[in-house]
Structure formats: structure tokens, C-alpha cells
Image: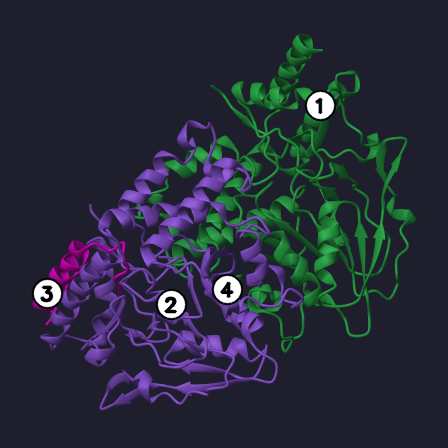
Chain colours: A green, B purple
Amino acid sequence: MTTYNFCAGPAMLPTEVMLQAQEELINWHGRGCSIMEMSHRGKEFMAVAAKAEQDLRDLMQVPSNYKVLFMHGGGRGQFSAVPLNLMQPGKKADYIVSGAWSKAAAEEAVKFGGINTQQIQLKTDGVRSLTAEKDWQLDPQASFVHFCPNETVDGLEFTGVPDTQVPLVADLSSTILSRPLDVSRYGVIYAGAQKNIGPSGLTLVIVREDLLPKADANIPAILDYRLAAENDSMFNTPPTYAWYLAGLVFEWLKRQGGVAAMGQINQRKADTLYNYLDQSDFYRNDVAAANRSWMNVPFFLADDRLNDLFIAESEAAGLLALKGHRMVGGMRASLYNAMPLEGVQTLVTFMQEFERVHG
Amino acid sequence: MTTYNFCAGPAMLPTEVMLQAQEELINWHGRGCSIMEMSHRGKEFMAVAAKAEQDLRDLMQVPSNYKVLFMHGGGRGQFSAVPLNLMQPGKKADYIVSGAWSKAAAEEAVKFGGINTQQIQLKTDGVRSLTAEKDWQLDPQASFVHFCPNETVDGLEFTGVPDTQVPLVADLSSTILSRPLDVSRYGVIYAGAQKNIGPSGLTLVIVREDLLPKADANIPAILDYRLAAENDSMFNTPPTYAWYLAGLVFEWLKRQGGVAAMGQINQRKADTLYNYLDQSDFYRNDVAAANRSWMNVPFFLADDRLNDLFIAESEAAGLLALKGHRMVGGMRASLYNAMPLEGVQTLVTFMQEFERVHG
């Protein structure tokens, strides 16, 4: 049976990538061992690492004055790393709170400096939306502005970029590589790998060189952007297997036509599901159209006594991990790059049939 | 051709483990997706995680008043985490420097508190050795004593444990699970996974509960022992695939007879190589017999002009990654748990033949 995995993360990886990984798992390129059993400083892994970085640079058109870092610690690690690396003495940082993840980032940042938080998620007549970035109150003296363009738990997103001279820091964990983006507008972009990049345990950081911390900053070494940049992300042993898999995903993205092509298909996937939800009285999504996430679609059954049955029957039909986040309830379908359009169409067909039987 | 991989890390994993991982990579236990594509909070991965912890507890006989944590960031991450979690106000910490890694740990620790360092590696008549732990000068008021029982780069080790009431912190990255060890003698044991446990990117920490930091300590979340302990190592998304592979390695170790059996075979492997080195004038190891590492055996050719040829011919013979660390030169054979005795015997046979032809 063909299965489609809607997990919010760790999420599905492209089938082609997984088949290639399986084929070369125990004997990488005829070398007699796995890539995960090789020294990170050997010529084989160094080549894998360099190609992954270059492919990412190509895909995102990363300007040459930005470093690309492959780090440990997930998005949560960056919740600490961002203020540790970027907070300036005597200045505060602006934290835009649009949902669960940006709230968690702000809670971590207060350990390392003063911050201003700004709540931008609204609920009006049962519809959730976000304050547009032109209406954010920003401190022109802030060390940086932190925001999270796509909220994985809440299912809200925005694609705008605030107009400010202060460095912008974006948590792109759940939306990186899902469509084109102008890297030059940002000071730091970071993303835990386990949604659109690869397996958990790897974190991608793209940082403008002038924002690297001073050499004598007392930052834990594994969170220090300067140390990572000066050592090609190998000040310590990186998560090599995750890095290798990320490289396979980047190659796959290039074969799909890059992020512009992914943006078109991701929009189509999202439209397919939202259009169906909107014409149904049996299901509903409560996010304003302009702020609906392409990546994470929470939805609810009008009769939540049917939730367990929906989960059981969808799993039996090969539609995996549709249960909503514990903070939100209901259902959630995550539609990252690796999810094909057919997966969304199969989900909608299942939902139609479930509605026909139980509606 | 059968290959044997002597890499110091990321190191070889047991062949049985790699074959099992390959078989279930894309369809774990018939669930239609990979274990790396599953939520860390789903029942499937939670069961994998719990079993891995229990198997480790069984193997090491971890007392019930110790937490076992699966963390991000490698051994380097712990170089920061140890002082951040354990340093007491107004007290210093003792750092025993036996080689490259304990030196690096001390260099990181000074960012987070006062330390005393003690150099214990000696060189007498060209022979390197370590000061016995009974002769260490220890501060009875120290927050903790940090030491590294096996130095991967230097090829030196000791199995003694100093007699002190101060919490002992041991970096066991390259020797954990290689023989029996009394966990109750230690306050904290930590190990990067990529030598005796699994792939890089995962770090194992075993910490006595009374040493967990206060709840209001401003420690970066991914390095905070209390947060990890209170959230079963899932305060953030853990490196799930590495955790799963570690679990397969623990199951394999149980099938081998546990750490007592591994200790016997590891001693035999080390004896096989050192005995050969000692009777040869063509090769040499310069560590005193009492301080020779079972895990990492550096050795030198009397004529170092033959080094490149030795590397080329050994690789052609399927004996991989024997080149010495860049700080030491020469050769290094790492003999972690996954290296079978036949691998060492094959290496010695190759060395005999190389000596016969070039000696």
C-alpha cells in the first residue's frame, strides 16, 4: 500500500532520497563502509559536505557575504544561539510572537538579554489572523528582530518582510526551501532540519558575515557562529549522516526545478486542501485566508466525537500522522516539500468518503 | 572484499546493526515509513527511545538515582554543559589534562567559571605515561573534577578512579561500553556517540539526580540537564535516527554478552596489536604499557618516508582510515567495540607482510 506521511516533524523525506540512502547505506560509493562511518575530516565526507553547501547556496541564491552553517541542536538550540551571538550591550531585541514557536523563542531569549515581545496573533469572530508586518511596532535601536514566518503548531504564516534597518532573524524551520525567498533581506535565517531538509539533529544557519560575534564572546562552542564559520562547521564532529541526507534532499530539489517549482506545487497542494475544507460543513479551518500556512494545515471535524475514528480510518488507509498537535487538538496535515500532490489528493478523497459515510 | 574500518570517529558500527538498519530504513516494522520520518512523540518512537534507555541501563547497571539523557551537540557540547550545570558559586573546578581532549574541555570550561588545571601526561626517555590518580592534587572544595579516561588522539588511557568526595565528571566518548565500569563512582558520565554508540550528532549523558541544576539556572535549553531529565530528553526534537541506531547497538551488545564480554575481547584485540608492535623494530608505539589505550592505538613506522605507501597499500587491502591524527602523525588504529578480532588479526598480518617487503 502506498502511504503518505503527514507528520509535522520529524517529517517524511522524498521517496527517491530514501531509496538512494538505503541503497548506499552500508557501502557508500563502493568504499566498503557507510558514509556515517567515515571521518568528517576525510576527503569523502568533506566533498559531500561542500557539495551540500553549494547546492543549498544555489537553491536559495545565498549571497557571498553570508555563511552557511550546519550545526547541532535543532531550532531550540538557535533560540539560545541567536541572542548569544547577536545581542548588543545596552540594547534590547524585538520578538514578534505569532504562535507557539515564536513564543518559545522569546521565552528562551530572556535568559540572555532584554527583549520586547509583541503578540500579533488575533482572533476575531472565531477566525485567527496575524497583524501585518507594516503595523509591527519596531525598536529602531534593537539588536535584532526575531520572527517565525510559519507557525507549525498554529498553522499560520506570513510571507512579508518588515521594512527596518535592524537585522532580521527568521526561524524558517517549517518553511525553508518551500518557495523563493530573498536571503539578502535577512541577517540570520535558521531552520531545524526535520521538516523540509532532512532528519532531526541537524540545524541550518545562514548568517550575514558582519553579524558574526566577536572572537572573545563567551558563547558555548557548539552555539558560536564565529567558531562554526571559521571551521566550516567542523569545530566539533557535525551530525554527518544528517548532513549527507540533507545533501541528497538538496540534489532532489534541484531535480524538481528548485524552489520556484516547489513554490508552485506547494501552493497547489495547499489550495487543494483548503478549497475542499472551505466548501465543507463537516470540516473547518479557522485561519484567515491571507495567513493560512502552506506547510501545516490544522483542521477540525464539526463533530469531534469522530476524531478517533478519523485517525483510525485514515491510518488504515495509509494516511499517516494526521492527529493534531496536543496544544490545538483536531487534525493537522503537514505538506512539506516531500509530500507529493497525489498525497493531498488522496487525503481529500479520503475526507470526502469519510464525510459521505459519517456526515 | 571484506573491509575493516579503523576510523577514530565517526567510527564503524557493527555489521549486523548496519544490515538491520538498511533492511528497515524505508519501512520500519511495516509502518510504511522510516523511523526517522516519525514523530518523536508518537508511540512508535517513544517505545524505541525507552527500550534504548533501558538496554543501556542494563548494560551499564546504571543505578536508579541516575538520569540517562540523549542530547544534541557531541562531546564538545558537554564541554560547555558540564560547567554550566555543575559549577557552584565561589568554587572552582579541577580539570585533569591527560591529552588533547581533556585540554580542550578545560579551555571551554574557563568561559563559565574558575578552574584549576593539572597536566598529568609525562614523557620520559621517549615514553609517554600518565600520573596515577592517587598522585593528583585535588581541591576538596571543588565543584567537580573533570577527566578523560581515554584520550583518542594521544592513545593514552587509565582505568582508575580518584578517591574524592567531589563529584567526578568523566568524558567517556571513546571508551564507554568497552568494559565494565562502576557508574556509582561518578557524578556525570558523558560520551559523544560516534565511537562506541552510534552515528555522530547524539550525546549520551548519565547524571546523578542530586547534581541536576536549579530550575532557574540560565543555561541554554539544549544543554540543560534538568530540562532534559524532566522531559525524557524531548524538550526539543532529539536526533531520533541516531537514537534509534544507538538502540540497535545496545541490543547488539547484549547479544555479545554485554560489557564484560566486550572487555575480554577488547583486551584481546589490544594485546594482539601491542604485542606485535613490541616485537617489531619496524613499527613502534611510545606509550607506557600501563597507560596504553585499548581503543586507540597510535603507531609509527621507523622510516616515516614509508607512511604514504603504508596508507595506500592498507587501503587497497581493505584496511581503512589508518592515517594518524594530524596533531600526532604516523598511524592510528581505533579498535572500538564494533571492530572484530579478525579485523585486528588481518591488520597484523598486513603489517607483517609490509614489514617483510619494506623492512
Which of the two discs, 3 and 2, labels the residue nearer the N terminus? 2
Which of the two discs, 2 and 4, labels the residue nearer the N terminus? 2
The residue singled out by tag 2 in the image is B184
What element does badge 3 sit on? helix
Amino acid under label 2? Ser
Percent x, y for residue B108?
53, 75
Could you tell me what secondary structure mostly forms the magenta stretch?
A: helix
**Residue B352: assigned label:** 3
Mark 1 to mark 2: distance in Å? Answer: 50 Å
Q: Which of marks 1 and 2 is in front?
A: 2
Labels 4 & 3 near each other (Cβ < 8 A):
no
- Numbered disc 4: what chain? B
Graded by Cα atoms within 10 Å as few (under 14), some (14 to 19) or many (20 or more), the crowding at tag 2 reads few
Answer left or right for A241 relative to B220: left
Which span of residues is magenta-colored?
A: B334-359
Graded by Cα atoms within 10 Å as few (under 14), some (14 to 19) or many (20 or more), the crowding at tag 1 reads few
Tell which of A156 and A67 is nearer to you.
A156
Mark 2 to mark 4: distance in Å? Answer: 12 Å
